[in-house]
Every structure is written in C-alpha cells, then in structure tokens.
Image (tube, helix red, strand yellow):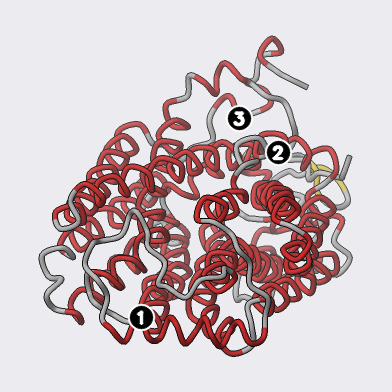
Amino acid sequence: MFNTVEAGTIVGGPVNNDTVNMAQVQTSRKGFCSVRHGLALILHLCNLSISTQQMNMSIALPVMVNNTALPSSPNASTERPPVDSQDNWNETLNESKAVAAVYDWSPEIQGVILSSLNYGSFLAPIPSSYMAEVFGTRYLSGTCMFITSVLALFTPLAADTGVTVLIVLRVIQGIVQVVLLTSQYSIWARWAPPQERSQLITIAVAGSVLGCFIIFLVGGYLCQTIGWPCVFYIFGGIGCVCSFLWFAVIYDDPVSHPFISTKEKEYIVCSLAQEGSPPGWSLPTKAMIKSLPLWSILVFYFSDYWHFFVLTSFLPTFITSVLQANIRDSGILSALPFASACICVVPGGLLADFLLSRKILRLNTIRKLFTAIGVLFPAVLFTSVYWVRSSFSTTIAFLTISSAIKSFAQSGALVNFVDIAPRYSALLRALSQIFSYLAGAISPTVNGFLISQDPELGWRNVFLLSAAVGILGLIFYLIFGQAEVQDWAKCRHAPASERTE
C-alpha cells in the first residue's frame, strides 16, 4: 500500500490555523514551474501516446490487407469519391506493399481486429480503481504504460505470426490501456489543489486530443512512405520513453516526492486538508447509487462521448463521400477539429481556475456554465453542417469551431467527479469510462444504420441525433449537477454498514 496524504497531516505535524503561514504558501501557486505542473505534462505525453496507440490500427489496416480497391463501408454514403481519390488510394497501397507485408484478411476479420481493443474495456475500469489503491498509481500506471508500448512494438510481429495472435495482443493491450487511463486520475486526488484542478487535469487530458490530431495527420503519410509497421514502432517507442519519464517524475503524493520544494508541498497538502476529503478507500455503495450529482456526471459522459464517436467513426467518411475530398487530404481535414480542441482545452481550464481563484463565480456555476457552452454552441454548429455542405470551407470551419468550443466541457462536467468525491476519483473515472464505452458501442451502430437507410438524409439525422443526445445530457446535468464534496465522499459521513473495505 502506498503512502497517502492525510487531510489532517502535513510535513512535520498536524495542520491547524497556526501551523502554516498561508501567505507564504500562496507563493507556490504562481507560475507553471512546479512539480505538479510537471506531473501534468508527463501525463499529457502519456495520454498522447495512448491515444496514438488506440488509433494506429485504424490508420494502418487499410494498407495491411491484400486488395487494391477502395474499401467500402456499410456506413458510408453511396456517393462515390472523385476519381483522383481512387488513384491516390491505389498508389498508397502499391507503395506500402513494396516495403511491408500484406495479409488476406476478410472484412469480417478486419472488423474483429479493429474491435478487439475494446473487448475487455467493460471489465477493466472498476478493478483498476481498486488496483490503484493497492499497488499505488505510480507503479500501476507506469507499468501499464510500459506494457502497452511494448505490445505496440510487437504488433507487426504478431500480425506475421497469425491473426489470432494479433487479436489476443490487441485485447490485452486494450485492457492495459483502460487500467492506465483509469488509475491515473487518483493522482489528482493527492496532487491537485481545488483551485488548480481544472488546469492540471485539462493539461493532462489535452494529450489525448493531441494524439488524435497527430495520428490523423501523419499516420497515413508514414504508412505510404515508410510502411505500416513504422506506425507501431514509432508510437510504441514514444510510449516506452514516456514510461521511463513516468517512473522518474511521478510519485503517488507530494509527501513522498524527493524533488518537490517545501513550500509547494505545504501548499498542496494544506489545500487538500481545507477541502476536508482525504484520499483513502471506503466505499459507500448505497449512497453512491442514490447520488443524483454522480448520475448527472455519468449521463453527461454518455452524451458527450456519443458526439466524440460520431467524429472518430464517421468524420473521414463524411469528408470523403459528401465533401468529395480525396483520401490523401481527408486525414488532414479530419485532424483539424482535434487540433482546435487541443488548442482550446488548456485555456478553458485556465479560465475556469481564474474565475474560481478570483471568486468571480462559484465552482458549481463554473462547471455548469462551461458545460452549457461546450454543448449548446457546438450543437448549433454541428447540426448546421448538413445545410452548409455545399460550401467546403464553411463546412470545415463549422466542424473545427464546434470542436474548439466543445472542449470547454472538459472544464465542466467532465472533470466534475473530482470535485464531488476526490478520494474516489479513480473509481468514478472508471464508472465514467463504462458510460463512455457504452456510448461507443451504441453511437456508431445507430448512426451507421441511419446513414445506410438513407445516404442523403442519413447524415442530417446523424447530426440532429448527436445534438439531441448532447442537449438531453446537458439538461440532466444542469438540474442535478453539483460541485461540492458529497457527504458520502467524506470519511466521517460514510456509515460503517455501507463501507466496503
């Protein structure tokens, strides 16, 4: 069991009003040259690497299979892309075959390969939150970072060995990635002062968005020029480097960190002590099930990730089939919304913390305001895409701007679970992942059915449905969402009969 920062304990003795000179501690809040911001940067790089490893197969698979025809998708529009798209695709395949192996995999096998990363996703989130408490976030997440990166390096060898070996490798890799993505959130329960929580978490989360942008931008080019194995070697190697940085910089709490200054350590521990919710592990199951603020966050996760999976699953198809862009350009154009989101997510977190630290708005108001901004404006722009599709530049602009504004929700409901129960942040992150994976299972299926039923009006229905789901999730969150630490998340309020040790 790793050391935890107890709410009533600071370096040298108990916390009280006379122990710590808060004026002195306040100085460690200024600037970004701090250990806690260094942790956020390492997490940013790790999330970037994980994101590229999650999507690398989607980029590489079209040039891994032995066919020279443009792959058809049952979810795609019946409109044919321009002739030069077919030529560019054939050229890509021919150049890739010259430097890398290809395989005779049927469309059904390809679907299994793409889906295999998620086969264990529903099983891993809850156990990983327990494992983070037992083994410590530093060792658990760092080990998972190294394992998934090594598995990425061995992916080309697994493909050569056989499709069964490749699928098993991807299943294991998916489970390991879920453990990493879940357990890392327990770090912020011990490292993130309440008034800096938004900026630190958004810095870390921005890595996932940047990873999507990078893999869309360069993945296809790497497959075409160097060969598809390089996608796994390059991003797997980056992940190995990140795992080494993780063990060098990341520690479970500020008390055990060897390089942190005394002022920063005192500031973090004092801030968490004032919040009155020390890290630990006792599970008030009944109270959590009855908690509407918790359910409001989980419902919003489902609605938000519905939109996310529309972008990741269908945006390249929409750009190719409806906007008539060639395949070479569709990857770059598909990356633009993720680039805008990556640029705006961190400033959104900084703005949220600024409003809170200056006491301009209450935390509850900030969370709901940023969530509303991140849903309503993108819903209008995203829905309008269907009616402005005749203008290529306007359509791309609407998609890019909507993703930029939608990133504000990251400083709203998507980070809210750390506010209501910081000591259970890893567990609540696990629950939110289950709801996001549920959206990932339903959204592509439903939207693919809509497009296949009517290739013309289907896209309109996809955009309208995405906006409707998002607005319904927002309404539920605005009614029941809160930002105060819940009674069931405080040790003194958790009845012994409800605790699971």
Looking at the image, which residue is at 79% across and 74% down?
A: 241
Q: Is 41 on the left-hand or right-hand side of 308?
A: right
Which quarter of the figure has residue 314? bottom left
Q: Secondary structure at mark 2?
A: helix
Frontmost residue, 276 versus 434 = 434
For the residue marked with disc 2, what is the amino acid?
Ser
Q: Nearer the viewer, residue 262 or 480?
A: 480
* Residue under label 1: 86
Residue at image position (17%, 77%) is: 394
Mark 2 nearby-residue class (10 Å; few <14, some 14–19, many ≥20):
many
- Give the label, 2 or 1, closer to the camera: 1
The residue tagged 3 is 489
* Residue type beneath disc 1: Gln
Task: Give the mark nearest the N terminus, 1 or 3.
Answer: 1
Q: Nearer the viewer, mark 1 or mark 3?
A: 1
The x, y position of residue 247, in whole percent, is 85, 64
**Among numbered discs 3 and 2, the one appearing first in the sequence:** 2
Residue 163 sits above or below residue 280 on the image:
below
Identify the secondary structure beneath mark 1.
helix
> What secondary structure is marked by label 3?
helix
Q: Which residue is mark 2?
A: 129
Left of 25 or right of it: where is 294?
left
Is residue 265 shown to the viewer in this render? no
At 15% from the left and 58% from the top, the residue drawn is 456
Quarter of the C terminus within the rendering:
top right
Left or right of residue 436: residue 383: left
The residues bearing labels 2 and 1 have C-alpha atoms spaced at a distance of: 47 Å
